[in-house]
Structures are given as C-alpha cells and as structure tokens.
Image (cartoon, rainbow, N blue to C red):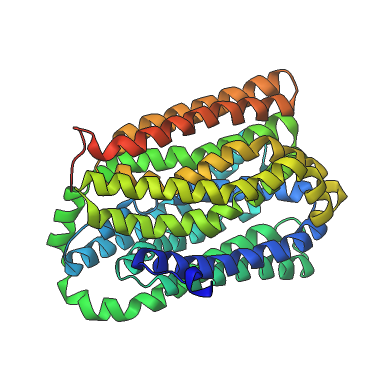
Amino acid sequence: MIKKLIPKTEFSKNVANVVGGTLLSQIITIALSPVLSRIYSPEDFGLYSIFINLAATTAVVSTFRYEFAVMLPQKDEEAMNVVSLSFLITFIYSIFIFLLFQLCGGVLLSFIHSEPIEPYLSWVALYVFFFGCMGTLNYWLSRMKKFRQLSYGKVAQSACTALFSILFFILGFQHGGLIVGAVIGQVSIGALYLVFFRADWLRLKAAVSWIKMKELFYRYIHFLTFNTPHSLLNVGQDLIVASLVNYYFGSEAAGFFFLSYRILKLPAGIISAATGQVFYQRVSELYPDADAMQHQIMKVYKKLFLYSIPIFGIVLLAGPYLFSFVFGSEWREAGVYSQILSPTLMLAFILGPVSVIAVVVKMQHYNMLIGIADIIIRTASLVIGGYYHNVYLAFVLMAGSTSLLLLYNMYWFYHLPKSKKAKSY
C-alpha cells in the first residue's frame, strides 16, 4: 500500500518535491491566519488587500515577462543571458516605480479611496524588485530541476510574512503590519533564490554578453508585446475588484472578500501551482508533439478535478461555519462570500497549471483577448451590484460569468497544441 503512494515517474517526483515545501508553507499560513484575523480588523485586511494588489499589479510586469523565456533556450548559456536580461529590466523598472509613486502615488490612492496606505507606498518598489528576482530564478531553478530549493523559498516567504506581520503589530504598526510583513516575505524568497542561484551564475557568467542579451530580447519579444499586457490584465483585475468592492461596499467588505479569496486560493498554492511548475517544464520538452501535450493536459485536468471536489465542496457546504470557527465570529460574512466564489475558484484551480500552454505554442495574443473579456465581466458585475447596493448580487454575477469563461478556456487550452496557428520558439 505504501509503495503505491510513492511517486514513480520523474514528473510525479518533481511535483511531490514542490508540493511538499509548498504544503508546509501553506500550513504555516493557515496556522497563523486565525492569529492575524484576531489582532487585525476586517478594515485592516481591506487596506492590506489594496496594497498587495497594487504591488502585485505593478510587480507582475517587472521583467516584461522575460522570466518565462528562461525555460525555452536549448543551451544553458543562452538561458543565463535571458536571466541577466530579466534582472536588468527588473532593476531599471523598480527605480522607475519608486520615482513614479513618489510623484503620483497620493493621487492614485485618492482616486481609489485608499489614502491610509500612502505611508507604505515607498515599500512597493522594494517588493517589485525582489518579486522580479524571484520570478526569474523560479524558472531558472525549474530549468535546473532544483524543485526542492523552490520549496525552501516558499516556506521562508510564508514564515517571514506571517511572523513579521505579528511582530510589527506588537511593535505598534496596527494598521500597516500586514503590509510590512508581506514585503519582508517577498524579500526573503527573492534573497534565498539568489543564494541558490550563485553557483550557477559563477559557472556560466562568462557566457553573458550585451550582444547576446540584445539578440534574445528581440527573439522573445512576444513576452513583452503580448504576455506582459495579458499578465497585467490578470493581476490588475484583482486590484480593480478590490478597489470596486472597497468603493461600493466599504473597507470591511473588502476585508471579508480578501480573506475569503485568500483562503480559497490556498489549494492552488499547494497543488495547482506545484503542478504548473513541473507541467511547464514538461510540455516545453514535449512540444511539438501535440498528442503527447494533449495527453498531459487531460491528465492534469482529471487529477486536479478529483482533488478539487473535497476541497471546495466543504467550503460550499459549510463556509460561514468554518470561517466563524477558525477566524472568529466577526468573519462569518467572509464564509458567505467563499460559498459564492468557490465554484469559479475551483475551475481556476483546475485550469491554472495548463495556462502556460499558450506561452509554449506562442499564442499569448489570443490569451490576452480572453483576459480582456475577463476583466470586463468582473468590472461589469461589481458595477451592477454596486448600483443596486447589493454585494451578494455583485459576487453571484461575477462568479457565474467568470465560471463560464473558465470553462471555455479549458476547452481552448486542450485543443491549442493542434491549432494550425500554433508556433514554436
């Protein structure tokens, strides 16, 4: 019986390595979340959600998405040039973000009714820099199949985020401790990945040149022209949703929404993200064998569907009771939100790892159109709910419309490897 549980294929072993560390990191998050929910108010979580979504929206394009190209060259020397290019872009972009927020940050926060987080705007640039480093090295370590080191970084990030959030509350940062903790957590994972990367850099740094970096910049420019806008839309939608919930229904509702969304996405952090990490490396090797790629896609769909049933089924049936018991009675409303959102997040959990197919077959521009549709229907749903002053109507409309779009995405991604328009890098 025990032997059956031991992963046999390389793919399964790699997933298990990532899942192990990721599971521990999420256990830390889950274990300390009840503590955080009792020392910070829903309003504090609402303001934190605005900051973290603003930082994430800004950071997601910190490399112009060239980190995805790290997996694509056949030679490690070329891949190291992509890493160096990505680092350079991140450094320049972080300086730009710092100056931009110093000049215009107050105006932006006033527009979205989030002035209380203005003292923490200068932390965004630091978050952006280490997010870019982490993203780039995430794919380098995957390329090197150092999945165990990836797990160490995730554990360090979760531990530092939670522990420093508690520490800074004790030190008197009652309203900003969550923000400072999140930034320190991001710094910790970026710095640790740099330590793991050092030996590979010393081995291959002689191959890095300005000429080669320039050549690779143009070879993979689709990541800048198509993947960057699409990624900005994907993460920007979270900022838009958080801002609209805060605008129409107040910071308390934004805090309830953030906690429910965060808890429901934990399974994605444990299983879906780990599967996607290894899936990208695997399908990059399989391309252009469309049949093999489709087999891999369907295999992922089936596995994640089976995993999703107990995870999201429990929340769907008993969300309010679970949130009241774990986080405190004042968070019961977050459990109601989780019931409404669980079907669409279940589909996102299944679909998430497979979305890199569009990158492998050079079809990001079509993926971007889907992202535009997604952000439009989310915005429209919240505006309609806000017009009628009904937060439940807003979330029901958003969950229903995005679920239909995700089902279409699942169908599209499965057939994408055989598309006549698909191309190879």
Residue extending farthest right: 329
* Above or below, 296 relative to 226: below
Q: x, y percentage for residue 133?
A: 40, 64
Residue 80 relative to residue 379: left or right? left
Q: Could you tell me which quadrant the N terminus lies in?
A: bottom right
* Above or below, 323 relative to 28: above
Q: x, y percentage for residue 300?
A: 42, 50
Residue at image point 87% right, 49% down:
329
Please identify the quarter of the rendering in which residue 183 is found.
bottom right
| Number of callouts | 0
Can residue 103 be seen here? The reply is no
Q: x, y percentage for residue 336?
A: 76, 38
Q: x, y percentage for residue 168?
A: 72, 67
Query: Which residue occupies the foreground of this view, 423 or 129?
Result: 423
Residue 66 relative to residue 48: left or right? left
Residue 74 relative to residue 67: left or right? left
Residue 108 relative to residue 29: left or right? left
Can residue 108 be seen here? The reply is yes
* Above or below, 371 relative to 197: above
Residue at image point 71% right, 38% down:
339
Residue at image point 69% right, 23% down:
386
Residue at image point 31% right, 35% down:
415
